[in-house]
C-alpha cells in the first residue's frame, strides 16, 4: 500500500517541479525583456542629451550655417573715422490682441504715450483679436518704461536693431539706407550689405565730411538763389581717383527714408543723365590750346 502511494505521488511531484521550472523560465524571460527595454531607453536618452548635443554643435560650426544670434550691423565711417551710420539695440512694442480686455481704454493710454500712433489705428489693432500685432517699432527707453508701468499682460517688447544715421541729410545718397529688417537697399548699405552684416569691422570710406559739409552748403545756396530743381557736386582726388565728396539735391533724411519722395531719393550724381551744355566748351578750348 505504501509502495503504491509512493508510486502514485512520484509523478505528481515531478509534474509540479516541471511547472515550477516553466514558470521560472517565463519569469526570467520577462525580466530580461524588461531589462533590455530599460537599456534601450537609457541608450536613447544618452544619445539625445549628450551625443545629439555634440552633433548640433558640429553643425553650427559650419560656415554655411546661420548664426543663432546675429550681432549688430557694422558701422560706416568717413576717412577720418567720423560716424556716418551705426546700429543700436531698440525695443519694439507688440500686443496679443486676444488678451486685451478693454481695447478702448488701452488704445487711449497708448495714444498718449506714443504720439506717432493714432487712437483709431491703435483701437483697430487692439480689437482685432489676433495673437500678434505690431504696435510700434523702435520705441524710446522712456516710452518703454512708461508702457511697462501699465502692467498690461497683453503688451510685450521685442529687442531689434535700429539703423541710425548721425549725419542725416548730409550723406543720404552716399550711405543709402536699410529696410526694417536691417537689410541694405540703397547706397553703401546695399553695396557692402554682406560685409556689414557678417563682420563688426567698420566700412571706412574716402569721403571727407568736412568737404561734404561745405559742398552741401554751397549747393544749397546756389539752388535757392537760382530756383533750381536740383543740384549736383562731386570732389575727386586727381592723383588717386578717390571720391572726397558727393552731393545730390534735393536729398532726404535716411533715418526716415519712408517719408521721402522719389525725387529726393534719386541720386543725380550716379543715375542722372544731363547734356554737357556750355561745360563742353572747356574741351574744345583745351583742344585749341593744345594744337597751338
Image: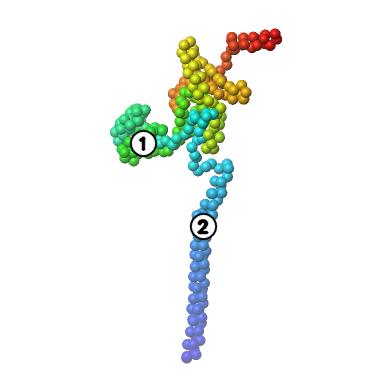
Percent x, y of residue 67? 52, 42
Q: Nearer the viewer, residue 220 or 23?
A: 220
Determine the image quadrant of residue 147. top left
Q: Residues within 10 Å of mark 2 (few under 14, many from 20)?
A: few
Rendered image: mark on residue 144: 1
Q: How would you rate the neighbour count of disc 1 (Cα within 10 Å): few for under 14, some for 14-19, many for 20 or more?
A: some
Q: Is residue 100 above or below residue 1?
A: above
Does the image show residue 163?
A: yes
Horizontal and vertical percent for residue 73?
Answer: 50, 35
> Where's residue 125, x and y in %?
37, 32
Tell me how many marks there are: 2
Sequence-first tag of 2 and 1: 2
Residue toward you, 38 or 208? 208
Q: Is residue 151 left or right of residue 64?
A: left
Q: CA distance from mark 2 to mark 1?
A: 44 Å
User: Is 259 on the left or on the right of 186, as rendered?
Assistant: left
Q: For mark 2, what is the residue? A: 46
Residue at x-position 46% and y-position 26%: 167
Badge 2 marks a residue whose secondary structure is: helix
Q: Secondary structure at mark 1?
A: helix
Quadrant hosting residue 286: top right
Would you say the residues marked 2 and 1 are in contact, meaning their CB atoms lie under 8 Å apart?
Answer: no
Amino acid at each position: 500500500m505504501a509502495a503504491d502511494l509512493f508510486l502514485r505521488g512520484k509523478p505528481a511531484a515531478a509534474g509540479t517541479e516541471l511547472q515550477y521550472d516553466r514558470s521560472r523560465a517565463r519569469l526570467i524571460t520577462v525580466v530580461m525583456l524588461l531589462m533590455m527595454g530599460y537599456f534601450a531607453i537609457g541608450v536613447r536618452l544618452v544619445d539625445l542629451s549628450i551625443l545629439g548635443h555634440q552633433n548640433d554643435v558640429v553643425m553650427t560650426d559650419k560656415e554655411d550655417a546661420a548664426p543663432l544670434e546675429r550681432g549688430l550691423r557694422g558701422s560706416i565711417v568717413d576717412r577720418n573715422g567720423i560716424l556716418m551710420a551705426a546700429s543700436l539695440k531698440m525695443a519694439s512694442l507688440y500686443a496679443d490682441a486676444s488678451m486685451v480686455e478693454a481695447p478702448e481704454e488701452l488704445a487711449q493710454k497708448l495714444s498718449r504715450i506714443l504720439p506717432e500712433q493714432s487712437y483709431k489705428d491703435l483701437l483697430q489693432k487692439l480689437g482685432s483679436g489676433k495673437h500678434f500685432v505690431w504696435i510700434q517699432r523702435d520705441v524710446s527707453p522712456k516710452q518703454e518704461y512708461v508702457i511697462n508701468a501699465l502692467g498690461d499682460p497683453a503688451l510685450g517688447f521685442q529687442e531689434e536693431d535700429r539703423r541710425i544715421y548721425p549725419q542725416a541729410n548730409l550723406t543720404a545718397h552716399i550711405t543709402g539706407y536699410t529696410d526694417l529688417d536691417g537689410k541694405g537697399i540703397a547706397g553703401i548699405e546695399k553695396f557692402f550689405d554682406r560685409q556689414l552684416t557678417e563682420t563688426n569691422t567698420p566700412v571706412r570710406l574716402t569721403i571727407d565730411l568736412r568737404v561734404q559739409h561745405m559742398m552741401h552748403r554751397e549747393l544749397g545756396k546756389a539752388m535757392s538763389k537760382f530756383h533750381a530743381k536740383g543740384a549736383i557736386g562731386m570732389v575727386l582726388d586727381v592723383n588717386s581717383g578717390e571720391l572726397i565728396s558727393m552731393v545730390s539735391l534735393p536729398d532726404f533724411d535716411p533715418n526716415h527714408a519712408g517719408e521721402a519722395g522719389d525725387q529726393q531719393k534719386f541720386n543725380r550724381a550716379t543715375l542722372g543723365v544731363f547734356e554737357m551744355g556750355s561745360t563742353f566748351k572747356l574741351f574744345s578750348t583745351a583742344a585749341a590750346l593744345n594744337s597751338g
